[in-house]
């Protein structure tokens, strides 16, 4: 069983995202540990990139702050090594193909396996191009997480059949960011996935309130939240930990009720 599926073993999963190195790596370490203690089931760690095409202004700004503060892939690998001394829940990297290419795909993915990263999300890699990374991921036991979007209709079944770890259901067209409401028919997308795969699926993009998290987790196996957490870190900087803890606890409680 993939380590990632353990995140879904105790009911609906709450999956927070944080940009590594924003405002600095020390704060990221405190935030990740605090989120794990507050009930996060799996944590997405963003490796900053200079041109994050799937991200809205909130996470783009976090990428800029992290890079300006000196975050590098190697420093983030060291951060994970330190976190793995006591953080036991699954963790995955979310980044862009260029980050992996420039580091060297084999070197990057084998290092992920060495330091205890369970999966990799590359939002700019379409399903048709995943063969550049998937064989290497399989070689080292790192799950390449597939994303399905509202536009994926005819391909959802195909993507789901070949997916690993969990399936990331993109709730809305466009970039990441907080949305007042999610209008996509998530239930229909999830039905298509479940007809083709036994893997858990979690919904992300646009979820910010406990009500939204409860609704999306009710339709799937979990809720993913990024921009709302990154906003708190942008607002409170190095003092963000208690605010993030309070938020994660409220979101986890909402997901539990789904």
Image (spheres, rainbow, N blue to C red):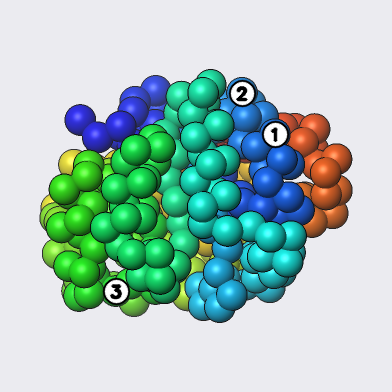
Name the spot of residue 99 as percent of width and height, x first.
44, 67
Given contact means CB atoms under 8 Å apart, are the residues at marks 2 and 1 in contact? no
Name the spot of residue 81 as percent of width and height, x first.
49, 35
Would you name the residue on which mark 2 appears? 37
Given contact means CB atoms under 8 Å apart, are the residues at marks 3 and 1 in contact? no
Given contact means CB atoms under 8 Å apart, are the residues at marks 3 and 2 in contact? no
Within 10 angstroms of label 1, few (less than 14), some, or many (20 or more) residues? some
Residue drawn at (71%, 54%), measured in percent from left and top?
22
Q: Is residue 218 visible?
A: no
Residue drawn at (76%, 53%), measured in percent from left and top?
23
Q: Which mark is residue 30?
A: 1
Q: Nearer the viewer, mark 2 or mark 1?
A: 1
Q: Secondary structure at mark 1?
A: helix
Judged left or right of residue 216, residue 50 is right
Q: Nearer the viewer, mark 3 or mark 1?
A: 1
Q: Of label 3 and label 2, which has the lower sequence position? A: 2
Q: CA distance from mark 3 to mark 1?
A: 33 Å
Q: Secondary structure at mark 3?
A: loop
User: Relative to 217, does residue 158 appear above or below in the rendering?
Assistant: below
Would you name the residue on which mark 3 appears? 126
Within 10 angstroms of label 2, few (less than 14), some, or many (20 or more) residues? some
């Amino acid at each position: 069983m993939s380590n990632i599926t353990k995140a879904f073993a105790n009911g609906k999963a709450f999956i927070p995202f944080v940009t590594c190195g924003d405002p600095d790596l020390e704060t990221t370490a405190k935030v990740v540990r605090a989120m794990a203690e507050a009930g996060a089931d799996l944590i997405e760690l963003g490796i900053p990139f200079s041109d994050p095409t799937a991200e809205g202004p909130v996470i783009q700004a976090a990428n800029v702050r992290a890079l300006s503060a000196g975050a590098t892939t190697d420093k983030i690998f060291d951060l994970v090594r330190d976190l793995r001394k006591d953080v036991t829940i699954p963790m995955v990297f979310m980044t862009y193909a260029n980050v992996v290419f420039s580091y060297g795909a084999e070197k990057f993915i084998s290092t992920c396996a060495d330091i205890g990263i369970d999966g990799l999300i590359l939002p700019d890699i379409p399903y048709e191009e995943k063969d550049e990374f998937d064989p290497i991921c399989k070689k080292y036991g790192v799950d390449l997480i597939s994303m399905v979007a509202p536009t994926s209709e005819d391909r959802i079944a195909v993507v789901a059949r070949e997916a690993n770890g969990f399936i990331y259901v993109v709730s809305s067209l466009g970039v990441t960011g907080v949305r007042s409401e999610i209008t996509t028919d998530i239930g229909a997308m999830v039905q298509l996935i479940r007809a083709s795969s036994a893997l858990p699926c979690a919904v992300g993009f646009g979820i910010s309130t406990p009500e939204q998290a409860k609704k999306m987790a009710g339709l799937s196996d979990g809720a993913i939240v990024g921009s709302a957490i990154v906003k708190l870190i942008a607002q409170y900087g190095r003092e963000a930990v208690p605010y993030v803890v309070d938020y994660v606890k409220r979101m986890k409680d909402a997901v539990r009720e789904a």
